[in-house]
Image: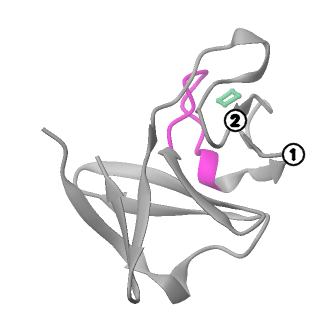
Amino acid sequence: MSQLLKICNKGELPQAGEAKEFSAGSRTLCIANVDGVIRALDNECPHRGGPLAGGVIEEGKVVCPWHAWAFDAATGVASDSQGRVAVYPVSVEGEAVFVRI
Ligand code: FES
């Protein structure tokens, strides 16, 4: 069963074109701002565990800082069929930002 977890306040979200790491329960998430749309992905890269939130956003993809695998921020699917990360719905209520895990 899914849970709605608060991850931060609106003011703490990354700026457009940036990503930031937040905790949600026992998970660490990469929260990415893709042209104003907030996306939530698992932070751990399936290649060798790189922290996706330390990467950059390019053309709607979160690019891992370690070896540049690129994950679609909306679907979590990597370019060139290199696997995928889980993505989670994000919602905002007032000042609070939630993910459904
Ligand atoms: S650890 Fe992410 S691309 Fe290698």
Extent of the magenta region: 43-53
> As displayed, is residue 1 above or below residue 11?
above
- Give residue 2's position: percent from left, percent from top: 19, 43
Q: Earlier in the sequence, mark 2 or mark 1?
A: 1
Q: Read off the residue under disc 1.
A: 59
Q: Is residue 59 left or right of residue 93?
A: right
Mark 2: which amino acid? Asp
Q: Which residue is at 75% across, 28% downward?
A: 69
CA separation in Å, label 2 and label 1: 9 Å
Residue 17 sits in which quadrant? Answer: bottom right
Q: Please, which residue is most extreme toward the top here?
A: 81
Mark 1: which amino acid? Glu
Check contact, mark 2 vs mark 1: CB within 8 A: no
Q: Read off the residue under disc 2.
A: 72
Q: Is residue 22 left or right of residue 55?
A: left
Q: Which image quarter is the N terminus in?
A: top left
- Give residue 33's position: percent from left, percent from top: 67, 64
